[in-house]
Amino acid sequence: MKIPNLRHAVAQMVMPRIEGNLLSEPAYRDAMTALVREGFGGFILFGGDRERTQRDLAGLQSSAEIPLLISSDVERGLGQQLSGGTRFPSQRAVASALGRRSKKDVDLLGRMLDAVRTETRAAGIHVVFSPVMDVNNNPDNPIICTRSFGEDPETVEWFGRHYIRSLQKPRRDGYLDLLACAKHFPGHGDTDQDSHSILPVIRADRARLNRVELPPFREAVKDGVAMVMIAHLLVPALDPLKPVTFSKKVVTALLREGMEFNGLIVSDALDMGALTGEYPQEEIAIRAVEAGMDILLHPVDARFTIDAVVKAVEKGRLTETRIHESVERIVAAKNRLGLFNTPLSPPLARGEAKGGRARKIDYEKHHKIAAEIGRKAIRLLYGDKNKLPLDSASGTACFVLDDDGQGMGDPFTRGLTKRFGRVNSITLTPAVGDSNLSSRLDTSSFDSVVIGIFSRISASKGRSGISPKLREAAFDILRRTKAAGKRSAVISFDSPYILDQFKDADFLIAGYDRIDAIQEAAVEMLAGA
């Protein structure tokens, strides 16, 4: 395919953010259409509605001379981004729920991934930034945690292989519905810092990297993953002088040449604090291309990024050959998806093709798959299951520690009330003042005490645990409960590592995710089911 000029070629490499919830607004839609007509290669989608957003994206495609590559973070299914889509459990919850040696569980995993593929392509999305191939070997990791399949490289490799092969399953016509993306190379698991805010340092030596962090990515390449995302990290054992994003030693020599990866290499978001706190925008863009990046994801200013790379070519710092190498890979990826044949009508826009006829997507069926996996994910990490259910004749005190102030825990508290009868539920947030907190902690009149912890893994939060105030409140609750001779249970609906702090409880339960089915399953476990 002939690209009109250098600027259009560079534009194919730039993938700015697009807001699905704003696309129906004329001014915003016009602004995005202007970017499309300037030759931008695609967008990373945030938010929207499964039906309206698909129509809006198709409208943008109609303005594109070269089909757009639409990507999105849907690690937990389409419902993570678009309302109406199915929200599946986190990767850690999936790994907890499904046994690798169980044919029934492997089949359930396949049905889940088929659902993700079907829904996502029907929404007009072509690239899923999934699976996360990081080995989460640091309990204090504030940004990976339950997004990873776990602490064991072999587990990460096994589940990653199934995600990649199912998400990239070829259609009958030979094209792919989706491209999967293994992230965050060379491994973001062993850090207690978040690259959204600061540049983390991975201090492992080369031998450890070859034993733990790198094997899942090597396997992902062997499994045919179409894309690899580069993390914003400093890994001295691989390059002591440059962040990985700018390191030709890591991006080109290790991944492209050493692992023989011939797919697309995409940066992590270029507006993240790991880079923007230290480097000007133009240097971020140019150095990433120098290192071997094909796609510059989510820059601060998309047009400025193109300007910077074009000027670098004109001044001889970058070559046109280097630019066209990336553009050829981008066009090849669009070809694999069949976008040049049907750029405006995704094959699954109205459902799965079967026997030449469109079939409506069964979202209700997909919700049931998500719920089934959620129910299987819950784990009793500490305590004697034979001593359940909890005593409840005189009632149960339930404390919901809502670390994010999002009003979480309703399915959990409703389920407790239905199962145990008299339940006094109190929600504590970091905003609750100390003077109010102490008056709410009386547990003496109840048979048992339950603490449910909700603490999201989210960008720029800086921690995966709960706030010091809520942690002290939980300690106080457990001390009072133990002194009164009552039994207690602590459930974490996000990071399982939070539970290590609460050894005074009689039962410690990991949910690995907060979807309704997992909250309901926690109630059933407490009830001895």
Image (tube, grey):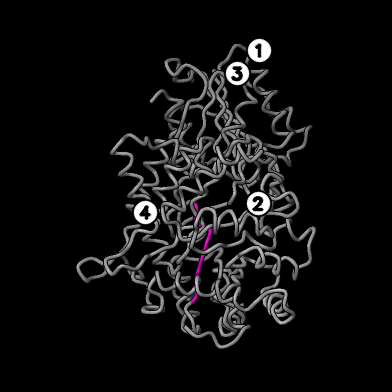
In the displayed structure, 367 sits above or below 375; it is: below
Classed neighbour count for the residue bearing mark 1: other residues with Cα under 10 Å, few (<14), some (14–19), many (≥20): few
Q: Which quadrant is home to the C terminus?
A: top left
Which of label 1 and label 4 is nearer to you? 4
Distance, label 3 to label 1, CA atoms, is 13 Å
Task: Say if mark 3 contacts mark 4, CB within 8 Å.
Answer: no
The mark closer to the camera, 3 or 4, is: 4
Which is nearer the N-term, disc 1 or disc 2? 2
* Residue that badge 3 annotates: 445
Residue span colored magenta: 68-75
The residues bearing labels 2 and 4 have C-alpha atoms spaced at a distance of 28 Å
Q: Mark 3 against mark 2, which lies toward the viewer?
A: 2
Give how far apart the Cα atoms at labels 3 and 4 are.
53 Å
Q: In the displayed image of the protein, which residue is found farthest to the left?
A: 355
The structure residue drawn at horizontal position 45% and vertical position 33%, both measured from the top left corner, is: 378
Q: Residues within 10 Å of mark 2 (few under 14, many from 20)?
A: some
